[in-house]
Amino acid sequence: MKIIFIFLVTQIIWISNSLAASKLNIFACEPEWSSLAKEIGGDKIKTFSATHSKQDPHHIRARPSLISKIRRADLLICSGAGLEVGWLPILLQKASDKVQTNGIGHIIASNFVDLIEIPDHVDRSMGDIHPEGNPHIHLNPHNILLVAQEIHKRLLIIDPDNTSYYNNKFEMFNTKWQEAIIRWENNAAELKGKPILVHHKSFSYLVEWLELNQIGSLEPRPGMPPTTSHLNGLLKTIESNPVDLIIRTPYDPRKASDWLTEKTNIPNVILPYTTDEEDVDNLFKLFDRTIFILKQ
Ligand SMILES: [Zn+2]
Protein backbone atom coordinates (compact mmCIF):
# COMPACT_ATOMS: atom_id res chain seq x y z
CA MET A 1 0.00 0.00 0.00
CA LYS A 2 2.79 2.35 1.04
CA ILE A 3 4.72 1.57 -2.14
CA ILE A 4 1.67 2.31 -4.31
CA PHE A 5 1.15 5.61 -2.47
CA ILE A 6 4.78 6.69 -2.99
CA PHE A 7 4.50 5.68 -6.65
CA LEU A 8 1.36 7.80 -7.10
CA VAL A 9 2.90 10.82 -5.37
CA THR A 10 5.99 10.52 -7.58
CA GLN A 11 3.79 10.35 -10.68
CA ILE A 12 1.81 13.45 -9.62
CA ILE A 13 5.03 15.39 -8.96
CA TRP A 14 6.42 14.25 -12.32
CA ILE A 15 3.23 15.27 -14.18
CA SER A 16 3.02 18.68 -12.49
CA ASN A 17 6.73 19.31 -13.15
CA SER A 18 6.38 18.44 -16.81
CA LEU A 19 3.27 20.64 -17.11
CA ALA A 20 5.16 23.53 -15.51
CA ALA A 21 8.11 22.89 -17.79
CA SER A 22 5.89 23.11 -20.87
CA LYS A 23 4.58 26.53 -19.91
CA LEU A 24 6.03 29.59 -21.61
CA ASN A 25 8.18 31.79 -19.38
CA ILE A 26 7.18 35.44 -19.52
CA PHE A 27 9.63 38.01 -18.18
CA ALA A 28 7.92 41.35 -17.57
CA CYS A 29 9.85 44.43 -16.52
CA GLU A 30 6.84 45.80 -14.61
CA PRO A 31 3.91 44.10 -12.83
CA GLU A 32 1.28 45.61 -15.18
CA TRP A 33 2.75 43.63 -18.09
CA SER A 34 2.91 40.34 -16.20
CA SER A 35 -0.75 40.89 -15.22
CA LEU A 36 -1.67 41.61 -18.83
CA ALA A 37 0.21 38.54 -20.08
CA LYS A 38 -1.74 36.41 -17.55
CA GLU A 39 -5.04 37.69 -18.97
CA ILE A 40 -4.14 36.30 -22.40
CA GLY A 41 -1.75 33.46 -21.63
CA GLY A 42 -3.76 32.05 -18.71
CA ASP A 43 -2.42 28.72 -17.47
CA LYS A 44 -0.24 28.19 -20.55
CA ILE A 45 2.32 30.67 -19.23
CA LYS A 46 4.39 31.40 -16.14
CA THR A 47 4.94 35.07 -15.45
CA PHE A 48 7.64 36.90 -13.57
CA SER A 49 7.96 40.63 -12.97
CA ALA A 50 11.42 42.15 -12.49
CA THR A 51 9.97 44.95 -10.35
CA HIS A 52 7.15 45.11 -7.82
CA SER A 53 4.65 47.83 -6.98
CA LYS A 54 6.84 49.43 -4.32
CA GLN A 55 9.92 49.66 -6.54
CA ASP A 56 10.76 52.52 -8.87
CA PRO A 57 11.13 50.82 -12.27
CA HIS A 58 13.54 53.58 -13.37
CA HIS A 59 16.09 52.40 -10.83
CA ILE A 60 16.64 48.78 -9.95
CA ARG A 61 19.78 46.66 -9.84
CA ALA A 62 20.42 44.01 -12.51
CA ARG A 63 20.88 41.41 -9.77
CA PRO A 64 21.80 37.72 -10.39
CA SER A 65 18.26 36.46 -9.62
CA LEU A 66 16.93 38.60 -12.50
CA ILE A 67 19.64 37.25 -14.81
CA SER A 68 18.59 33.67 -14.07
CA LYS A 69 14.96 34.58 -14.84
CA ILE A 70 15.73 36.36 -18.12
CA ARG A 71 17.90 33.44 -19.28
CA ARG A 72 14.81 31.21 -19.25
CA ALA A 73 12.42 33.77 -20.79
CA ASP A 74 10.47 32.92 -23.96
CA LEU A 75 8.82 36.35 -24.09
CA LEU A 76 9.91 39.67 -22.60
CA ILE A 77 7.49 42.57 -22.10
CA CYS A 78 8.79 45.96 -20.97
CA SER A 79 7.54 49.55 -21.10
CA GLY A 80 10.53 50.94 -22.98
CA ALA A 81 10.90 54.64 -23.88
CA GLY A 82 13.94 54.73 -21.60
CA LEU A 83 12.20 53.46 -18.46
CA GLU A 84 14.48 50.44 -18.05
CA VAL A 85 17.59 51.91 -19.70
CA GLY A 86 19.59 51.62 -16.46
CA TRP A 87 19.18 47.86 -16.06
CA LEU A 88 17.50 46.00 -18.93
CA PRO A 89 20.48 46.20 -21.36
CA ILE A 90 22.67 44.54 -18.70
CA LEU A 91 20.14 41.71 -18.25
CA LEU A 92 19.73 41.26 -22.01
CA GLN A 93 23.44 40.49 -22.34
CA LYS A 94 22.65 37.22 -20.57
CA ALA A 95 19.39 36.44 -22.36
CA SER A 96 18.72 34.15 -25.32
CA ASP A 97 18.41 35.37 -28.92
CA LYS A 98 14.61 35.08 -28.93
CA VAL A 99 14.14 37.91 -26.42
CA GLN A 100 16.84 40.20 -27.88
CA THR A 101 15.78 43.53 -29.41
CA ASN A 102 14.77 42.13 -32.79
CA GLY A 103 13.58 38.77 -31.51
CA ILE A 104 10.00 37.54 -31.72
CA GLY A 105 9.97 37.33 -27.93
CA HIS A 106 10.79 41.01 -27.33
CA ILE A 107 7.87 43.38 -26.77
CA ILE A 108 8.45 47.03 -25.99
CA ALA A 109 5.00 48.28 -25.03
CA SER A 110 5.66 51.95 -25.76
CA ASN A 111 6.32 51.08 -29.44
CA PHE A 112 2.61 50.29 -29.83
CA VAL A 113 1.07 53.45 -28.36
CA ASP A 114 1.31 57.20 -28.92
CA LEU A 115 3.86 58.61 -26.49
CA ILE A 116 3.13 61.94 -24.83
CA GLU A 117 5.41 64.60 -23.34
CA ILE A 118 8.15 64.06 -25.93
CA PRO A 119 10.65 66.82 -25.10
CA ASP A 120 11.86 69.27 -27.76
CA HIS A 121 15.32 68.92 -26.36
CA VAL A 122 16.76 66.95 -23.46
CA ASP A 123 19.32 68.16 -21.01
CA ARG A 124 20.45 65.00 -19.25
CA SER A 125 22.63 67.06 -16.92
CA MET A 126 19.37 68.22 -15.34
CA GLY A 127 18.55 64.59 -14.52
CA ASP A 128 15.70 64.27 -17.00
CA ILE A 129 14.76 60.58 -17.10
CA HIS A 130 12.04 60.89 -19.76
CA PRO A 131 14.23 61.75 -22.77
CA GLU A 132 12.08 59.83 -25.27
CA GLY A 133 8.72 60.98 -23.91
CA ASN A 134 6.71 59.69 -20.96
CA PRO A 135 7.25 55.91 -20.55
CA HIS A 136 4.47 55.33 -17.94
CA ILE A 137 1.98 54.36 -20.65
CA HIS A 138 -0.13 51.76 -18.82
CA LEU A 139 -2.45 54.13 -16.96
CA ASN A 140 -4.52 54.75 -20.06
CA PRO A 141 -6.61 51.57 -20.50
CA HIS A 142 -6.78 52.13 -24.27
CA ASN A 143 -2.99 51.63 -24.30
CA ILE A 144 -3.40 48.38 -22.37
CA LEU A 145 -5.60 47.06 -25.16
CA LEU A 146 -3.02 47.96 -27.83
CA VAL A 147 -0.32 46.09 -25.94
CA ALA A 148 -2.70 43.16 -25.31
CA GLN A 149 -3.15 42.81 -29.09
CA GLU A 150 0.62 42.56 -29.53
CA ILE A 151 1.04 40.02 -26.71
CA HIS A 152 -1.73 37.93 -28.29
CA LYS A 153 -0.02 38.06 -31.70
CA ARG A 154 3.36 37.01 -30.28
CA LEU A 155 1.91 34.15 -28.23
CA LEU A 156 0.34 32.74 -31.41
CA ILE A 157 3.73 32.80 -33.13
CA ILE A 158 5.75 31.45 -30.20
CA ASP A 159 3.26 28.76 -29.16
CA PRO A 160 1.03 27.88 -32.17
CA ASP A 161 -0.16 24.62 -30.55
CA ASN A 162 -2.31 26.67 -28.18
CA THR A 163 -3.75 29.04 -30.79
CA SER A 164 -7.42 28.45 -29.99
CA TYR A 165 -6.74 28.82 -26.25
CA TYR A 166 -5.00 32.20 -26.73
CA ASN A 167 -7.68 33.36 -29.20
CA ASN A 168 -10.44 32.59 -26.68
CA LYS A 169 -8.61 34.22 -23.79
CA PHE A 170 -7.86 37.33 -25.86
CA GLU A 171 -11.46 37.66 -27.06
CA MET A 172 -12.76 37.31 -23.51
CA PHE A 173 -10.30 39.90 -22.23
CA ASN A 174 -10.99 42.26 -25.13
CA THR A 175 -14.77 42.20 -24.53
CA LYS A 176 -14.48 42.53 -20.75
CA TRP A 177 -11.87 45.30 -21.00
CA GLN A 178 -13.89 47.38 -23.50
CA GLU A 179 -16.94 47.10 -21.22
CA ALA A 180 -14.78 48.13 -18.26
CA ILE A 181 -13.45 51.19 -20.14
CA ILE A 182 -17.03 52.41 -20.69
CA ARG A 183 -17.83 51.80 -17.01
CA TRP A 184 -14.66 53.63 -15.87
CA GLU A 185 -15.25 56.55 -18.20
CA ASN A 186 -18.83 56.96 -16.96
CA ASN A 187 -17.79 56.53 -13.37
CA ALA A 188 -14.94 59.05 -13.66
CA ALA A 189 -16.82 61.69 -15.69
CA GLU A 190 -17.12 63.91 -12.62
CA LEU A 191 -13.30 63.99 -12.32
CA LYS A 192 -12.93 65.94 -15.57
CA GLY A 193 -10.92 69.10 -14.89
CA LYS A 194 -9.97 68.05 -11.34
CA PRO A 195 -6.81 70.02 -10.51
CA ILE A 196 -4.00 67.83 -9.18
CA LEU A 197 -0.30 67.87 -8.44
CA VAL A 198 1.85 64.79 -9.00
CA HIS A 199 5.16 63.85 -7.39
CA HIS A 200 6.71 62.34 -10.55
CA LYS A 201 5.05 62.38 -13.97
CA SER A 202 3.90 58.80 -13.41
CA PHE A 203 0.24 59.56 -14.08
CA SER A 204 0.31 61.65 -17.26
CA TYR A 205 -1.55 59.04 -19.36
CA LEU A 206 -4.22 58.75 -16.66
CA VAL A 207 -4.43 62.56 -16.55
CA GLU A 208 -4.85 62.72 -20.31
CA TRP A 209 -7.43 59.90 -20.41
CA LEU A 210 -9.64 61.24 -17.60
CA GLU A 211 -9.01 64.88 -18.59
CA LEU A 212 -7.70 65.76 -15.14
CA ASN A 213 -5.92 69.08 -14.81
CA GLN A 214 -2.26 68.48 -13.90
CA ILE A 215 -1.15 71.79 -12.41
CA GLY A 216 2.43 70.67 -11.86
CA SER A 217 4.81 68.07 -10.48
CA LEU A 218 6.82 68.13 -7.29
CA GLU A 219 9.91 67.12 -9.21
CA PRO A 220 11.26 70.11 -11.17
CA ARG A 221 12.04 67.68 -14.02
CA PRO A 222 11.30 63.95 -14.24
CA GLY A 223 13.85 62.23 -12.02
CA MET A 224 15.12 65.40 -10.31
CA PRO A 225 14.24 65.40 -6.58
CA PRO A 226 12.00 68.26 -5.37
CA THR A 227 13.92 71.38 -4.37
CA THR A 228 12.88 74.07 -1.89
CA SER A 229 12.78 76.73 -4.59
CA HIS A 230 10.62 74.56 -6.87
CA LEU A 231 8.20 73.73 -4.02
CA ASN A 232 7.98 77.42 -3.08
CA GLY A 233 7.20 78.15 -6.73
CA LEU A 234 4.42 75.56 -6.57
CA LEU A 235 2.99 77.27 -3.46
CA LYS A 236 2.66 80.47 -5.53
CA THR A 237 1.12 78.55 -8.43
CA ILE A 238 -1.44 76.99 -6.08
CA GLU A 239 -2.51 80.46 -4.86
CA SER A 240 -3.79 81.33 -8.33
CA ASN A 241 -4.61 77.74 -9.44
CA PRO A 242 -6.26 75.90 -6.53
CA VAL A 243 -5.38 72.20 -6.35
CA ASP A 244 -7.66 69.42 -4.99
CA LEU A 245 -5.21 66.61 -4.50
CA ILE A 246 -1.50 65.70 -4.54
CA ILE A 247 -0.85 62.19 -5.87
CA ARG A 248 2.13 59.88 -5.85
CA THR A 249 3.05 56.23 -6.39
CA PRO A 250 3.75 53.76 -3.55
CA TYR A 251 7.50 54.18 -4.21
CA ASP A 252 7.77 57.97 -4.41
CA PRO A 253 9.27 59.54 -1.28
CA ARG A 254 6.51 61.20 0.76
CA LYS A 255 8.49 64.11 2.22
CA ALA A 256 7.69 66.74 -0.42
CA SER A 257 3.96 65.95 -0.64
CA ASP A 258 3.69 65.94 3.17
CA TRP A 259 5.43 69.33 3.29
CA LEU A 260 2.99 70.78 0.74
CA THR A 261 0.01 69.27 2.58
CA GLU A 262 1.21 70.84 5.80
CA LYS A 263 1.54 74.26 4.13
CA THR A 264 -1.71 74.16 2.16
CA ASN A 265 -4.03 71.53 3.71
CA ILE A 266 -4.36 69.95 0.27
CA PRO A 267 -4.62 66.19 0.91
CA ASN A 268 -2.01 63.87 -0.57
CA VAL A 269 -2.75 60.27 -1.54
CA ILE A 270 -0.98 57.24 -2.89
CA LEU A 271 -2.54 55.72 -5.99
CA PRO A 272 -1.76 52.05 -6.58
CA TYR A 273 0.04 52.84 -9.91
CA THR A 274 0.45 49.16 -10.84
CA THR A 275 -0.79 45.70 -9.90
CA ASP A 276 0.46 43.96 -6.78
CA GLU A 277 0.06 40.61 -5.08
CA GLU A 278 -2.32 41.87 -2.40
CA ASP A 279 -5.51 43.83 -3.05
CA VAL A 280 -4.82 45.12 -6.59
CA ASP A 281 -3.97 41.75 -8.08
CA ASN A 282 -5.26 42.41 -11.61
CA LEU A 283 -5.54 45.28 -14.07
CA PHE A 284 -9.31 45.67 -13.62
CA LYS A 285 -8.79 46.30 -9.92
CA LEU A 286 -5.97 48.76 -10.70
CA PHE A 287 -8.35 51.08 -12.56
CA ASP A 288 -11.30 50.45 -10.19
CA ARG A 289 -9.15 51.37 -7.22
CA THR A 290 -7.47 54.38 -8.89
CA ILE A 291 -10.80 55.95 -9.82
CA PHE A 292 -12.28 55.12 -6.41
CA ILE A 293 -9.42 56.95 -4.63
CA LEU A 294 -9.56 59.95 -6.99
CA LYS A 295 -13.30 60.33 -6.27
CA GLN A 296 -12.84 60.34 -2.47
ZN1 LIG B 1 9.22 58.33 -15.00
Image: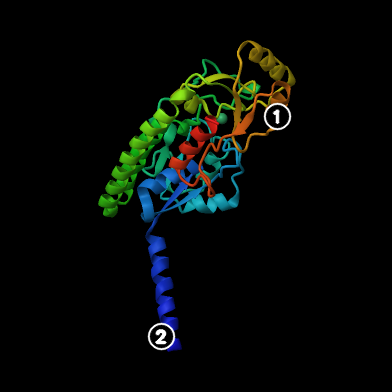
Q: Tell me which colouring the rendered structure shows.
A: rainbow
Q: Position of residue 149 (x, y in %)?
A: 33, 38
Of marks 1 and 2, which one's residue comes earlier in the chain?
Answer: 2
Does the numbered disc 2 mark a residue whose Cβ is under 8 Å from ligand 1?
A: no
Q: Position of residue 11 (x, y in %)?
A: 40, 76
Report which residue position mark 2 lands on. 4
In this view, the mark in front (1 or 2) = 1
In the image, residue 40 sits, relative to residue 180, either above or below, namely below
- Secondary structure, mark 1, is helix
Please state the quadrant of the image where ligand 1 appears: top right
> 216 or 149: which is nearer to us?
216
Q: Position of residue 122 (x, y in %)?
A: 56, 19
Q: Position of residue 201 (x, y in %)?
A: 56, 26
For marks 1 and 2, give the CA distance.
64 Å
> 139 or 99: which is nearer to us?
139
Pointers 1 and 2 in contact (C-beta within 8 Å): no
Q: Residues within 10 Å of mark 1 (few under 14, many from 20)?
A: some
> 230 or 110: which is nearer to us?
230
In the current view of this chain or complex, which residue is farthest to the top? 240
- Secondary structure, mark 2, is helix
Q: Residues within 10 Å of mark 2 (few under 14, many from 20)?
A: few
What amino acid is labelled 1 in the image? Asp
Residue sitting at x 52%, y 30%: 295
- Quadrant containing the C terminus is top right
In the image, residue 36 sits, relative to residue 24, either above or below, namely above
Disc assigned to residue 258: 1
